[in-house]
Amino acid sequence: MKHPWYHASLKIAPLVVLFLLPTLGCSDSVSESARSDKPRFAYVTNGVASFWNIAAAGAEAAAKDADVDVTVYMPDGLTDQTRSIEDLITRGTDGIAISPIDADNQIGILNKAAAATKLITHDSDAPKSDRLTYVGMDNYKAGLMCGQLVRDALPSGGTVMLFIGRLDQDNAQLRRQGCIDRILGREPDSTRRDDPGVILSSPDGQYEVLGTLTDQFDRAKAKANVEDTLTRHPDIGAMVGLFVYNPPAILEALDRADKTGKVKVIGFDEADITLQAIKDGAVVGTVVQDPFQYGYESIRLLTGLHRGDESILPSTGFIDVPPRVIDNGNLEPFWKTLKEQMATN
Amino acid sequence: MTSATAAIFEARGVCKRYGGVHALDDVSLSVRPGEVLAVVGENGAGKSTLMKVLAGVVQPSRGSVLVDGRPTVFAHIHQALSAGVALIHQELNLAPNLDLGANVFLGREPRRLGFISKKAIADQARQHMARVGLEVSPEVRLDSLSLGQQQLVEIAKALSVDARVLIMDEPTSSLSQQEADKLYKVVRQLRERGIAICYISHRLHEVTDLADRVVVLRDGRSVGELSGAQIDRDKIVRMMVGRDISQYYQRTPLAAGGVAITARSLRTSAFPSEELDFSVRSGEIVGLAGLVGAGRTELLTTLFGITPMLGGSLHVDGKPYAPQTAAEAIAAGVVLAPEDRRQCGLLLQKGVRWNLSLASLRKTLSRWGFVRPRAEGKLCTDTIEQLRIKTPDRESPVHTLSGGNQQKVVLGKWLATKPRVLLLDEPTRGIDVGSKSEIYALMHELAGRGVAVLFASSDMEEILGLSDRALVMHHGRITGEVHRDQLSEESVMQLAVAET
Amino acid sequence: MRANRLNPFSSLEGSKFLGIFSLLMVICIYTAISSDRFLLAANLENIVHRTALFGILSIGVAFVIVTGGIDLSIGSVVCLTGVMLPFLLTQCNWSVAASLATVLGASAAIGLFHGVMITKMRLQPFVVTLCGLLFYRGAARGITKDRSQGFGLEFTDLRSLATGHIPLFGDVAGDFRLPATTLLLIIIAIIAMVILNRTVFGRYLFAIGGNREAARYSGINVDRFTTSAYVICSTLAGLGGILFVLDINAAQPSDFGNFYELYAIAAAVLGGCSLRGGEGNISGVVVGAAVMVVLTNTINLVHPEYQKIEFAIIGGVILAGVTADALVRRLVASRNRANSS
């Protein structure tokens, strides 16, 4: 009655052990910041991404410099983020820096946090809440820079498709809108919102934005979106990947379709693959934020506020950490610094 | 029966078609208060459909149902209930995960201030259960009871609605003799109280005992009605099958061969402190009699390796035998046709072919793990022909077959393994008269080929008619052994209730 | 009887396959009419490639569903193998063979664990694999410290396993080149079909799903075969995870493979598997996976403005599919009843 398949599966069991051992070996142990009387701050991201690892490194560097404790939370979606804030309020903390996923709908919980402790936002703002200030870049402005890259890459015009993880967060909407507005040569207006499914043309008819496709952070879907776009619009001029993993997904699909270099790719953020592709010429350029500064500035601000120093609050209500365009001209020094920042984490 | 009493409940010219099939064709009957009307017929004769029409479970295609002389349409079984018509269904309609009280009052729980009153339920349920002689706490879960006890709960449930008309569909098919006797008493009491009872049964002796009138159905039509002194068993059988099979237990006892299976000090999980000793010889048919809960099923499943053996020893053909699984039992030549065919015996949704070959696939019908379709097909064709299994083709799902043919499929599955010892648990439960005799003939034939047959049955006629020898169990013990020449209802009953 | 066996469409299973296949054809024809790009070789390549990736997961879960079980952990197993493979290769510098063997072995071990918990501890499959869904996701995030894992620009040879094409048809099929993953799917599907329909093992899986107790009473080692089904399911999920990550080049522990168990189960159900067990056929499951893939392709090619309601469209089509199936089934049943009179 012994079935051969069963035996095969039994023999596999020891492999589990094999499988677990190396993973322990190659991951260094997680350092727990010791409990102390130092001020404790929370740095809350809007998800899990390598981008946030750099920001976390910045936050931790600031914590070290200022001799405070910081805990980094990388929530898994809106619900998880809201719950994290609730827990932080319950537990008590000396300050929270947060990148709200859906600012307009989180006003309630953000105000509750602002009442309980010092609250600032970073990366994505919640202007309608009682947050003390915002550390980050103007996503709309970054979008404009992205759009400028497109125009530069397609000097005589062409069609453009935008790819993004999702559109239900404020920074994504602004970034996309800025990009579109510049491509079409419109007057900047950060309150404008175009429907993602509508084809938009510039007044002179040279540039056409074919639409914006979302993938809900599913990378297989991100790639499929690009592939289907290539199928539908074989003569497309440029593709813009607005979230960190979108440019690599675009490159992957182009490579498969043998169209690398034939379609202009404009990126956002600094995935290794994106940077390498800039070096190789497959990507025109990318707009990078400075996540390390987000982390560092957030904790520096919170520390100051905690010590009662209101003067560090900027009169503009927001601390600008401006985005930068990275292209073949300035890639090398940027990449070097980035590697150093990652290494310290 | 005074003709002055009008019929309380009546069916006139009822027809029911399923697709192109006439399940019922122009059937009329009526019941008066204080009367037991029996409806008999082979499986497929239309009895169950008739009962469903009467109770409002299905709507007739033509004809009408009348309560108190007024035509009534029951859109739903609840409407039938509120008109005082209750159906006790063949398949149990109970929730096994609830306690007895909850089952009795399911859907009409006594409430206090909108909350279910557990105490009221328990008190009232206890009264209703006492009326069917069920002495169990209303707070035990239904699935902790035997099938027989569950059937009594269903009857108690119907009694609790104060029905004026009670439709009972095979109510005793899973009861032991003792429990059935209790039920007969209940039925008679209900008749005294003026309740009209419509009673379907395969057990002709209870029909002849209980019924005031008998309606016989065949192929969806009413073929006759007998009343009072006309009610005679042989006459009924003739009307049912259209031929005479009064001799269906006939058999010439064979010279039994050597011992096929022996148990020494066998202890089963049902009664761990009791030790069982017995043996069955090749070519012998041994009946296992006893009341429900006497430990017969557990004995059979232990012999088959399904429930663990707690002690003692077994030998098959002289070789030690200690099955841990059914696979080991089958390898040693011991097979079991279980009590609950639908639950444990058959893949109901699958075809006859799959069911017949299931137990012999690995050993004889495959090569290198691949099924040999031709060998399998031949086995099926042969078995269907040999056992006269009535099926449109060998791919028909077995749930579409009648109970008798389903049991033949179970037996066919085991015949293919060439067993040495055939165990059967209630081999003819829910099976109509015609198929019953075929199952009996099959058991005889197997015994004739040298198979040792051990069968448990709650049907006294079956024990008396089939056994070369009967083992009688009471509360986990074998209280006695009766040989064919001494077999009688009294000798078996005395041992079964162990009033020594 | 013989005719019945030879003509697959006269059986219930055959009619179900025909049903789902027609649904696929309707969607394809609609898309082909609405977009002249749909039938391009490159697009068809994309479709069969994506179908292969999801189809492999769906075939795995079909084995479990046939036995009457369910596996909710598939997406998390996809994630675990998807991040472990680049992790072992790039962070731990293991050899390709050792990494693949370890990752596949680990997924098989996960299936074995599920099977043992379900059969020996008598836990419900839903519960065991739901805990698996949470556990493996957490493990993947923990092991990688929540960092995206990828191959960067290396391992292009290994990656061609998922990204390569096979010039199988020469010039006959025009520009169409068969993706390597599709060939893999075809091989796996054929093996799965043979196992389910031609072997004793397959018959036993159906028997267990049809009626567990009856299978046990017929001498089948129910626990052992049930466990095997979970091993097959998790192993194929692990293989799927490997192919996904090789294809996409990077995997993010927090969302890689999210919801894939539901796509797989939906494809299996669309393809004719009954969640009650005992029913299912592999060709239907593969077509079911294709339906889901083509639907998203249709939305992208024809109605990108509907991308917002993509899930609603997929859900609606699946519901319509299974409803139509139920109606057809009822019709067939009543006709059979009429015929058998």
Image: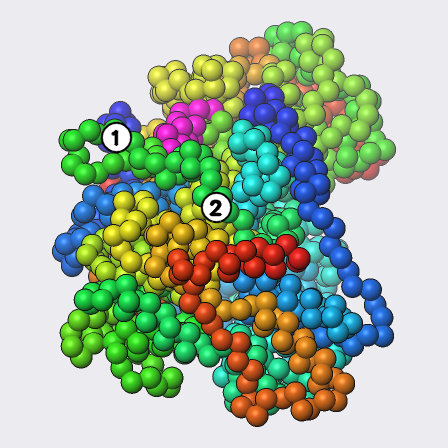
Was residue C186 drawn as part of the magenta stretch in this picture?
Answer: yes
Relative depth, front residue between B475 and A131: A131
Q: Quadrant of residue B305?
A: top right
| The magenta segment | C184-200
**Dominant secondary structure (helix, strand or loop) of the stretch shown in magenta:** helix
- Residues under numbered marks 2 and 1 in contact, where contact means CB atoms less than 8 Å apart: no
Q: Is residue B355 visible?
A: no
Q: Nearer the viewer, mark 2 or mark 1?
A: 2
Numbered disc 2: secondary structure: loop
Image quarter (top left, top right, bottom left or bottom right) of the C terminus of chain B: top right
Q: Upstream in the sequence, badge 2 or badge 1?
A: 2
Was residue B151 drawn as part of the magenta stretch in this picture?
Answer: no
How far apart are the two marked residues, 2 and 1, measured between alpha carbons?
Answer: 27 Å
Look at 23% across and 60% down and name the residue there.
A237
Q: Position of residue B297 (x, y in %)?
A: 67, 34
Subunit under mark 2: C
Please tell me whether residue A309 is drawn above or below residue B96 in the rendered image: below
Q: Position of residue C113 (x, y in %)?
A: 64, 39
Q: Is residue A189 visible?
A: yes
Look at 76% across and 85% down and name the residue there.
A307
Q: Position of residue A17 (x, y in %)?
A: 69, 35
Reading the image, the residue beneath label 2 is C152
Relative depth, front residue between A9 and A283: A283
Task: Indicate left or right for A205 with B210 as reference.
Answer: left
Look at 33% across and 67% down and name the residue there.
A149
Please tell me whether residue A103 is drawn above or below residue C214 in the rendered image: below
> For the residue carrying disc 1, how many other residues have a C-alpha within 10 Å: few (<14), some (14-19), or many (20+)?
some
Q: Amino acid at mark 1?
A: Pro
Residue C167 — which label?
1
